[in-house]
Amino acid sequence: MGGPGGTEVLRQAVAERTSVRVRPAGVEDLSGCAGIIAQEDLWRQYGVSRSTALTLLRKALGAGEPVLVAVRGGAVVGFVWFQLHGCFGRSGYVRWIATHPSVRNEGIGTALLRAAEARILRHGPNVFLLVSHVNRRAQRFYRGRGYERVGVLRDYVRRGVHEWIYRKTLGPLAPWRGEGGGKKARRR
Ligand SMILES: CC(C)(COP(=O)(O)OP(=O)(O)OC[C@H]1O[C@@H](n2cnc3c(N)ncnc32)[C@H](O)[C@@H]1OP(=O)(O)O)[C@@H](O)C(=O)NCCC(=O)NCCS
């Protein structure tokens, strides 16, 4: 992860069980993020390789889209990439979230998701995401964090793979800013 020696840094970080910090990603963190993606069958099934992931994440960061990383002992052990208005042009959308397999079930995914939600919910009352119909672990993870399955996109990315649409909501858009009401969404 994260360039030469990255795997060793990760191994040490995992062994040490040091505390995890969630912070905005810099370009130097992205190879660690792409390394996590590259290990997952999930993204392989969509044809996303390490280099594709790196390209997409660089583009996202370049476009000002938020990417947060979870860092332990200097190693990237998880990340979340999201868009404040990526769903219907007016609601938050969590594009990718992943933690390294060696640190799962420790609360790091939850910390990343909460950090993304905190940013998104300052701009509007909804968070959306897509999850593959076969990805039961992630479905359970989202349900446990207040998300509800609200629809399905059949054959959306790949034929035979359906995407469940998950939503977490604090309420309707109005009267949030820009939706005809008086109450203003707080800014960053
Ligand atoms: C989904 C994913 C991001 C979750 O990350 P994670 O770091 O394991 O998340 P957490 O540890 O916060 O939560 C996972 C489970 O561990 C439990 N957990 C959290 N802290 C724990 C602890 N200290 N001890 C034991 N269990 C714990 C949580 O309650 C949760 O259980 P649940 O899913 O039944 O509700 C991770 O599994 C992943 O990267 N999967 C592959 C990529 C993927 O599918 N991404 C989503 C694409 S839509």
Image (tube, helix red, strand yellow):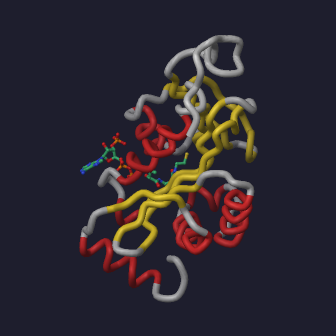
Q: How many marks?
A: 0
Q: Quadrant of residue 108?
A: bottom left
Q: Position of residue 58 (x, y in %)?
A: 69, 65
In this rendered view, identify the residue nearer to me: 40 or 160.
40
Left/right of residue 179 with respect to residue 32 in the rendered view? right
Foreground pick, 83 / 53: 83
Q: Quarter of the image holding residue 64? A: bottom right
- The residue sitting at 60% across, 52% down in the picture is 66
Q: Residue at coordinates 67% horizontally, 68% vertically from top-left?
A: 54
The residue located at (40%, 34%) in the rendering is 145
**Hey, which quadrant is residue 3 in on the image?**
bottom right
Residue 145, compared with residue 33, is above or below; it is above
**92 up-or-down from 54: above or below:** above
Rendered location of residue 38, percent (x, y) = 58, 68
The image shows residue 66, relative to residue 174, as above or below, that is below
The residue positioned 75% from the left and 32% from the top of the image is 89
Of the pair 166 and 159, the residue shown nearer to us: 166
Q: Is residue 19 left or right of residue 126?
A: left
Where residue 152 sits: x, y (%)?
Answer: 65, 29
In this image, 10 relative to 117: left or right?
Answer: left
**Residue 31 location (% of width, % of height):** 59, 73
| Quadrant (top left, top right, bottom left, bottom right) of the C terminus | top right
